[in-house]
Amino acid sequence: MPRPIEARIKLAALRHNYLLGRRHAARHNSAAKAWAVVKANAYGHGLLRAAAALGDVADGFALLDLDEAVRLREAGIRQPILLLEGFFEAADLSVCAAYQLTAVVHCLEQLEMLRLAPAPLCLPIYLKLNTGMNRLGLRAEQLPAVRRKLAASPAVGAVTLMTHFAEADGDGGERCIAWQLERFTAMISGWTDAERLPVSLANSAAILRYPQTAHDWVRPGIMLYGGSPFADQDAASLDLLPVMTLRSRILAVQEIGVGERVGYGGTFVARVPTRVGVVACGYADGYPRHAPGGTPILVAGRRTQTLGRVSMDMLACDLTELPESGVNSPVVLWGEGLPADEVATAAGTISYELFCALARRVPVVEG
Ligand SMILES: *Cc1c(COP(=O)(O)O)cnc(C)c1O
């Protein structure tokens, strides 16, 4: 029998969440399309699995790696595929053309590669403007050079304008996005053709809270996987369904007396006689080692908490109040019944990181 841990991925929930995102965007623009953001192996859910689940509904797929884009095409995906960091060297351009990829162009160096590329490429590009995230994107003062290079680049096909919000998940309301929208508008004013170009701005947080940012294409990521992008609002209240449920079982039970400690470093000390459940899940499975004792966990459908430090292959939880639970009782680390966002918050991180960190050794079952 294999070790009893598994990640169950609910494909119907993924579809539900995608369609919800597109409906939100449609409140502002009924024709808005949505890239399913499937970077980082579909946030740990499996690239080809996610693509298969969304293959007949998604308007397009967005990711980072050229190789992953090629894998999607070879798996039969016909929709547009967007490379969120674009291409990395001139040789990538012929792959982009051969596989009909759309590339983000975020710097002058990429534009120069395009200018030198042979004309028949006709590569659709997403021109990324830096409106204050200060990660990727062209700055206002670079735009005259950008427009000159674009005009001199017959290899460039359709152009879409994009930017990325730094604080759409913030709790300050509209002003979390307003300042970047202002900069975006200012950057493209005076660029006469820009009014005719399609626009893509919104990540999950913006889609859910600021539908006025929807424009032509939105870019939902975390919401597809049922995570809330907000610290102050949970996924259920946003009508998002959990997609990944990380499940395991109790391997062993230890009945310990007052003063006994649990796990490495003995960080948990029993103040009352305690029934300790040992779960087959540790940081080598992707459970965060940072999760302190007291992190919520479900045993046989009932909520309890972890005890002491997370080990590589195991963690401990408190069964004192769950006398009906014991060896073999089913455990949910996160997912259905226990939102990943709650576990993430307890561990000082975000659900994005929990999902992406799911280890390869954890078997995945679709359900
Ligand atoms: C990852 C990413 C997204 C999706 O962000 P979420 O917060 O997961 O919705 C959208 N746009 C870009 C450019 C990204 O890199």
Image (tube, rainbow, N blue to C red):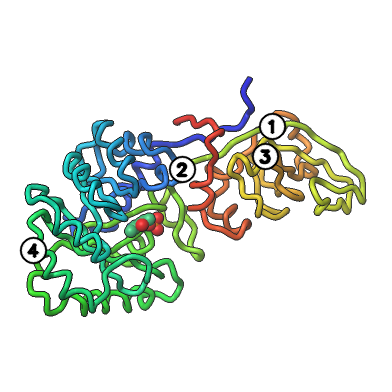
Question: Label 4 vs label 2: CA separation?
Answer: 40 Å
Q: Amino acid at mark 3?
A: Val
Of the numbered discs 3 and 2, the one sitting upstream in the chain is 2
Q: Amino acid at mark 1?
A: Ser
Q: Residues within 10 Å of mark 4 (few under 14, many from 20)?
A: some
Which numbered dot is residue 44?
2
Quickly name the residue at label 1. 329
Residue lying at 80% horizontally and 45% vertically, measured from the top left? 263
Instruction: Give the side of residue 169 with respect to residue 114, left or right.
Output: right
Quickly name the residue at label 3. 299
Question: Label 3 vs label 2: CA separation?
Answer: 24 Å
Front one among 156 and 162 = 156
Instruction: Give the side of residue 199 with respect to residue 306, left or right.
Output: left
Residue lying at 21% horizontally and 63% vertically, measured from the top left? 127
Q: Amino acid at mark 2?
A: Gly
Instruction: Give the side of residue 276 with respect to residue 148, left or right.
Output: right
Front one among 126 and 232 = 126
Q: Residue 53 appears at what percent x and percent y?
A: 33, 36
| On screen, residue 70 above or below 271 | above
Of marks 4 and 2, the one in the foreground: 4
Q: Amino acid at mark 4?
A: Ala
The secondary element bearing badge 3 is classed as strand
Quickly name the residue at label 4. 152
Pointer 1 with pointer 3, Cβ within 8 A: yes
Question: Label 1 vs label 4: CA separation?
Answer: 66 Å
Residue lying at 62% horizontally and 40% vertically, measured from the top left? 284
Question: Label 1 vs label 3: CA separation?
Answer: 7 Å
Q: Residue 253 appears at what percent x and percent y?
A: 80, 34
